[in-house]
């Protein structure tokens, strides 16, 4: 193989693929120059005056770039299977994906993580996994698995395991929590991803001194810059909900800072958004629109990311480097017209790759102890008591904490001004059920339910009456996970998410349509249009975000970290 | 340990060492700012507002930098033992040394390489070895060892082995020489150092496509830039003889190129020169004098080098990074006033470190088959024949090819206008002796000899008569290697180099004085002052440099690669 690469480099043999007359974006030297790129055996053989290729692609007036690198994402949040998700990323030029399978690990532990790896074997993408560091995320809920350092050991030897996923337990690090430190120790020679929103001062120094090397939570340039100075690489995040790029890049543009330790990521981005605009391609485009030199933006999307994560021979167009190459129309639109992974056209390759069928056990993840309609009886809210209410704030995942009188509950439910909110443990049939009240969801005379419920992914049901809530819960048990919508005891619509109750195996296009449909039906039943009916619901059980939540263990004050 | 580091970072415990009020040169962000640096357990715990330290160092008006990295050097060329050599580097702020023990490997193979590693264990320096790729360097001479891929296998698991040393056999790479390719394959996941003087065009692409990642041979900016574009990192060389820095840095200054893939090295630098001005410190200083922004120059000397060689947590001053830190007076003089390795003052540490005594077998490396004075009888040059003459060119290691009539030889020898030049195989007592003629060495009525003889390190003797040449050779056999100078059958001076005939175990200061003395005595015997009597001699057997050489196999035309 290497002999053939050399023969091509020396001009003695035709390239497998020759990209002619393009402007090469050389992220190593920071230059752009006209050259032909000869590729052989998956490797870039030569950049220069090459003329023979078994396949020749004309890139006149176009740019030849290294494939993009998405440095941090949760594939499961797209609800697509890893193979379907990767296809969307590839179409927009991402040839390297660094993922943290935090969601599936909360349901299925190592089995889930292995599925995420196996489902992408053979795909034309460099797919790396950071092992989720916080499963379960908190002691205030029950997840499907506990992933401690001991459980992680068996993952270390798997191909594609790059390091430890975002270490969210900042207090655990700073206070020497032995279970957290055991994980840092296990991965000390690999990359430790951070997650440290608003962390600064000595706490940041302590976090960095513990070996954490990246962070994707910065929301301002001041925050990002302090982290850069602390030796932490900044993964600028631009997802569907968390959009931090403008604030940070505007800061960079006005500063003479070295950007070598900055890259891009999406964290969570909806499938429909990816399909429309891509992930890293969108980041580069936005950064350039904000005034960042195109070269620096492209370096962030390629070589910087590779260097931060120690990925050798990735992220540049140069002889001997892996032939992950994209051709784009121009540096403003950045639409990939050709995407090569190891010298193969990814779209051709995807078609030819056999689909990996997930382990059957991942399809039966919903295990709930028996319960009855009575569980959701509104009469459990006593007339002469006051109750805390989770209040949805439009456009935010932070909630407000409200209050209602028990005597008003039946009327407010009937008027569609209040919902009951139940969180049913669904992994080990423990019978745990937390029930509270929810305002601002808008649903009238019905129930909505989901098994996507951050971070433990229990079964969340919101509804105005016991019958519909019971039916909704039963429906999701019956289909083993998904989204559902029920009215007057009848299922209005169900989107099955059979893989761990998190993911559909439908093709992306179909999945996007089905998601739009069920969301629109929820809107039709009263959910305000500025709320994403299911994504908003999926955050109502997340005990790490202020101010009030419901978990399978009860109503939780997430400002003071105690159950009410 | 990590708990204590965190406590220091959080301001809850005093640092082991606190450097106060210095200007931190932050090579990650490209900024310089006032801060205190708290160090604990060998790690940088925090950079910021720290006030408690068991030991406090005031750095007011001074600069705090990461320790320098010398990316390519041959320790043996200093003739000091590795520990003594490292002491000199450390004094000038080099805390990471990447060495290629090419010389000792030619004499003693793996045993020599292991000695170079073992002799530095426990020293306050990060000492890495690139395994010599070309032992022997050519088939036109006999070295002490053959280091093929199979022999290299046992080295792979040793601590400190970083990759493969400079791959000088460029034709071997390009023509698929299986013995060369086996070495590239063996080290394919590590760093492959290159050595490709003047290589460009498709040959360069072929060399880079083979996985070679660095080069230290560029002598012009055009050459360096073409290599950078080919994905090859440039190690800008500034040694005692090869001085490439000015040509390359002047090019960089006039160019907007990204310098992230550029670093500094010395290759070969004399001990006296290091003692006077340092190595990488001198490179940084010269680069700044030539107009390079100090930050870019310091990045080349630190973080760039670390990134090129994949050395994690080295090369920057940031929490969690290894506490290899230097304090310099200013950015023009760059004299280190404090050098820390893993938070320890290197000078203190050096004093406390026990000297490693080399393996006794390394001290008996000179094995020569019996020979007599007759071997050097000038009558072997027949009166009626013409003979090629190696002609020394002042200040160069390239030689000219001259000619003399055999009938003139006795007269020219007697007048001191010609020397005989003998190269005696000295590793395996094969009896191989090559004899030729040398012009321009200037020696009158005597002989000089050395066992430092690139690359195979046979025994070189230059002299005007058989008796002195015989005595000189016998003297070096007797002391088992070194430099010697003989006149009228008597030894004028000998510098023993007992370790493989390459290195002295004398302290650097003593060694420098002894080198000066014997060189001055050679000058007194007629060697011109613009020639370094022994270093020049040591290159007279190097068959890879034009135009004429003598090896143990005979007189060699190194332009046409054939014996005469």
Image: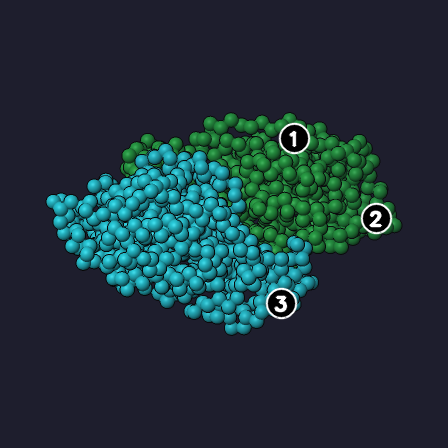
Chain colours: A cyan, B green
Q: Residue furthest right?
A: B384
Q: Residue at x 45, y 59 (%)?
A: A506
Q: Check disc 1 and report the residue beneath it.
A: B362
Q: Are marks 2 and 1 on the same chain?
A: yes
Q: Check disc 3 and report the residue beneath it.
A: A55
Q: Quadrant of the C terminus of chain A?
A: top left
In the rendered structure, the answer to whether residue A118 lies left or right of residue B416 reads: left
Binning the other alpha carbons within 10 Å of mark 3 as few (below 14), some (14 to 19) or many (20 upward) gives few
Residue B104 seen by the camera: no
Q: Residue at x 32, y 40 (%)?
A: A431
Q: Secondary structure at mark 3?
A: strand
Q: Where residue B502 sits: x, y (%)? A: 64, 36
In the rendered structure, the answer to whether residue A219 lies left or right of residue B373 reads: left
Residue A530: quadrant of the picture? bottom left
How far apart, in angstroms, are the residues tagged by discs 2 and 1?
41 Å
Q: Where residue B140 sits: x, y (%)? A: 75, 46
How far apart, in angstroms, are the residues tagged by discs 2 and 3?
64 Å
| Marks 2 & 1, CB-CB < 8 Å contact | no
> Mark 1 belongs to which subunit?
B
Binning the other alpha carbons within 10 Å of mark 2 as few (below 14), some (14 to 19) or many (20 upward) gives some
Q: Check disc 2 and report the residue beneath it.
A: B406
From the viewer's perspective, is the residue at label 3 or at label 1 nearer?
Answer: 3
Toward the viewer: A24 or A279?
A279
How far apart, in angstroms, are the residues tagged by discs 3 and 1?
57 Å
Q: Where residue B418 sits: x, y (%)? A: 75, 46
> Mark 3 belongs to which subunit?
A
């Amino acid at each position: 193989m290497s002999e053939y690469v050399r023969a091509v480099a020396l001009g003695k043999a035709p390239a497998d693929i020759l990209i002619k007359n393009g402007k090469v974006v050389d992220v190593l030297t920071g230059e752009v120059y006209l050259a032909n790129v000869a590729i052989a055996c998956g490797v870039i053989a030569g950049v220069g005056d090459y003329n023979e290729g078994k396949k020749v692609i004309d890139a006149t007036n176009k740019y030849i770039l290294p494939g993009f690198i998405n440095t941090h994402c949760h594939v499961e949040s797209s609800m697509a299977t890893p193979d379907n998700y990767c296809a969307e990323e590839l179409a927009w030029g991402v040839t390297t994906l660094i993922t943290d399978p935090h969601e599936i690990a909360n349901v299925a532990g190592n089995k889930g993580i292995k599925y995420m790896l196996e489902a992408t074997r053979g795909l034309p993408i460099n797919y790396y996994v950071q092992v989720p560091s916080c499963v379960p995320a908190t002691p205030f809920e029950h997840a499907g698995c506990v992933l401690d350092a001991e459980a992680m050991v068996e993952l270390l030897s798997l191909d594609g395991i790059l390091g430890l996923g975002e270490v969210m337990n900042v207090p655990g690090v700073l206070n020497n929590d032995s279970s957290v430190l055991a994980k840092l120790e296990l991965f000390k020679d690999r990359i430790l991803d951070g997650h440290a929103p608003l962390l600064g001062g000595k706490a940041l120094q302590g976090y960095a001194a513990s070996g954490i090397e990246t962070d994707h939570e910065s929301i301002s340039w001041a925050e990002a810059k302090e982290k850069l100075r602390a030796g932490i690489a900044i993964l600028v995040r631009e997802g569907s909900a968390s959009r931090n790029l403008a604030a940070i890049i505007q800061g960079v543009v006005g500063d003479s800072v070295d950007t070598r330790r900055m890259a891009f990521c999406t964290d969570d981005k909806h499938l429909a958004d990816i399909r429309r605009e891509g992930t890293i391609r969108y980041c580069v485009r936005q950064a350039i629109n904000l005034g960042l030199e195109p070269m620096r933006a492209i370096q962030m999307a390629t070589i910087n990311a590779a260097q931060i994560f120690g990925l050798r021979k990735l992220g540049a167009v140069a002889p001997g480097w892996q032939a992950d190459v994209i051709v784009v129309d121009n540096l403003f639109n950045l639409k990939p017209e050709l995407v090569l992974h190891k010298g193969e056209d990814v779209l051709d390759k995807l078609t030819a790759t056999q689909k990996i069928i997930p382990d059957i056990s991942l399809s039966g993840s919903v295990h709930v102890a028996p319960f009855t309609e009575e569980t959701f009886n509104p009469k459990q809210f006593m007339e002469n008591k006051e109750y805390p209410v989770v209040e949805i704030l439009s456009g935010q995942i932070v909630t407000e904490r409200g209050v209602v009188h028990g005597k008003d509950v039946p009327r407010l439910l009937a008027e569609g001004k209040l919902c009951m909110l139940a969180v049913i443990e669904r992994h080990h049939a423990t019978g745990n059920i937390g029930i509270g009240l929810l305002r601002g969801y808008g649903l009238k005379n019905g129930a909505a339910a989901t098994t996507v419920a951050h971070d433990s992914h229990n079964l969340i049901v919101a509804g105005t009456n016991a019958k519909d809530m019971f039916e909704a819960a039963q429906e999701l048990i019956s289909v083993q996970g998904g989204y559902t919508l029920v009215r007057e005891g009848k299922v209005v619509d169900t989107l099955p998410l059979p893989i761990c109750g998190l993911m559909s195996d439908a093709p992306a296009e179909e999945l996007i349509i089905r998601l739009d449909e069920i969301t629109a039906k929820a809107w039709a039943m009263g959910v305000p249009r500025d709320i994403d009916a299911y994504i908003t619901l999926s955050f109502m059980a997340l005990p790490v975000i202020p101010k009030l939540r419901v978990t399978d263990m009860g109503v939780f004050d997430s400002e003071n970290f105690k159950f009410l």
